[in-house]
Image: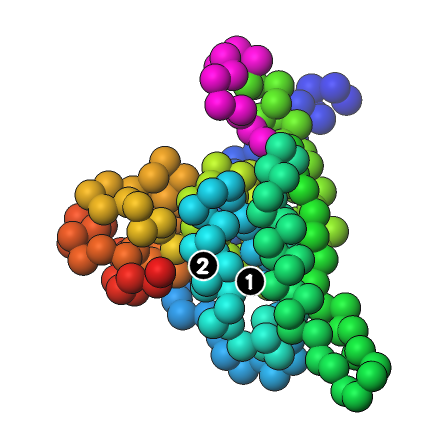
């Protein structure tokens, strides 16, 4: 009985690997296509914020979005980042509609934090545990939110989130269109986050803000300067 079970397992493993490979190929192929625009209702939107200039650039991009289309909006920043989410909260409060003396508050935005994979100056050995923790937390957030659109622009915080969203696509448990906008500070080469998403083909749309970057990375799209 034990030998039969072992033989069955040996036969099943190649089948499972083949199915998984086909599914990954399908996801990669579909990720390269423009996202569908047939949906009339709002799209659950995950917006990844990074410290400093990353947040300023992302909030500039968010201000140009069609608010009725990309709603509700979920803003995510690193747990040690104390500045990004308050900026997003100020922006969302500015969108509150006022009629007479009554404020009509539309609950179309939520704000949350995520563990960092690695802090600045942290050793690579200790970062193994923190990366695992960040990945599990990112997976939990993606399963909870089930975003249909993800916007990110370079902070390392976006990697576990995008990887988790990609895994859900492979498993058939959800579909997120990932839009990556490389920071304007990247003139000659991509950031590490951008390079990973570009090489692994996780992003549905990959934008750069300098023409020489588009020439170096032909699958990227030149968006012009967004700041």
The verdict on residue 187 being magenta is no
Whether residue 204 sits left or right of residue 88 in the image: it is: left
> Residue placed farthest to the bottom in the image?
100
Residue with the mark numbered 1: 149
Residue ID at (66%, 58%): 89
> Residue placed farthest to the front in the image?
101
Residue with the mark numbered 2: 179
Q: Do callouts 1 and 2 mark residues in contact (Cβ within 8 Å)?
A: yes
The verdict on residue 123 being magenta is yes
The x and y percentages for residue 41 are: 65, 80
Q: Is residue 226 above or below residue 198?
A: below
The x and y percentages for residue 65 are: 51, 72
Q: Cα distance, mark 1 to mark 2? A: 7 Å
Q: How many marks?
A: 2
Whether residue 101 sits left or right of residue 167 in the image: it is: right
Whether residue 155 sits left or right of residue 109 in the image: it is: left
Q: Earlier in the sequence, mark 1 or mark 2?
A: 1
Query: Residue 25, can we see it?
Result: no
The residue lying toward the viewer, choosing from 13 and 213, is 213
The x and y percentages for residue 141 are: 69, 46
Secondary element at image label 1: strand
The residue lying toward the viewer, choosing from 144 and 207, is 207
Residue ID at (62%, 19%): 129
Q: Main secondary structure of the magenta part?
A: loop
The residue stretch that appears in magenta: 116-126
Local packing at callout 1 (Cα closer than 10 Å; few below 14, some 14-19, many 20+) is many
Dividing the picture into quadrants, the one containing residue 148 is bottom right
Local packing at callout 2 (Cα closer than 10 Å; few below 14, some 14-19, many 20+) is some
């Amino acid at each position: 009985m034990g030998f039969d079970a072992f033989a069955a397992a040996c036969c099943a493993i190649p089948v499972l690997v083949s199915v998984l490979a086909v599914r990954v190929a399908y996801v990669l192929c579909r990720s390269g296509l423009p996202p569908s625009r047939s949906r009339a209702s709002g799209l659950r939107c995950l917006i990844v914020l990074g410290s400093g200039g990353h947040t300023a650039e992302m909030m500039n991009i968010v201000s140009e979005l069609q608010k009725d289309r990309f709603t509700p909006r979920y803003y995510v920043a690193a747990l040690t980042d104390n500045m990004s989410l308050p900026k997003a909260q100020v922006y969302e409060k500015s969108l509150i509609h006022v009629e007479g003396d009554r404020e009509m508050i539309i609950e179309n935005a939520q704000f949350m934090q995520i563990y960092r994979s690695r802090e600045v100056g942290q050793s690579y050995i200790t970062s193994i545990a923190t990366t695992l923790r960040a990945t599990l937390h990112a997976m939990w957030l993606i399963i909870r939110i089930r975003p249909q659109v993800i916007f990110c622009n370079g902070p390392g915080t976006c990697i576990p989130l995008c990887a988790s969203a990609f895994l859900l696509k492979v498993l058939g448990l959800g579909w997120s269109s990932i839009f990556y906008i490389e920071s304007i500070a990247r003139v000659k080469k991509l950031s590490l986050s951008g390079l990973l998403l570009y090489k692994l083909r996780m992003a549905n749309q990959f934008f750069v803000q300098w023409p020489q970057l588009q020439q170096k990375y032909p699958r990227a799209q030149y968006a012009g300067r967004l700041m």
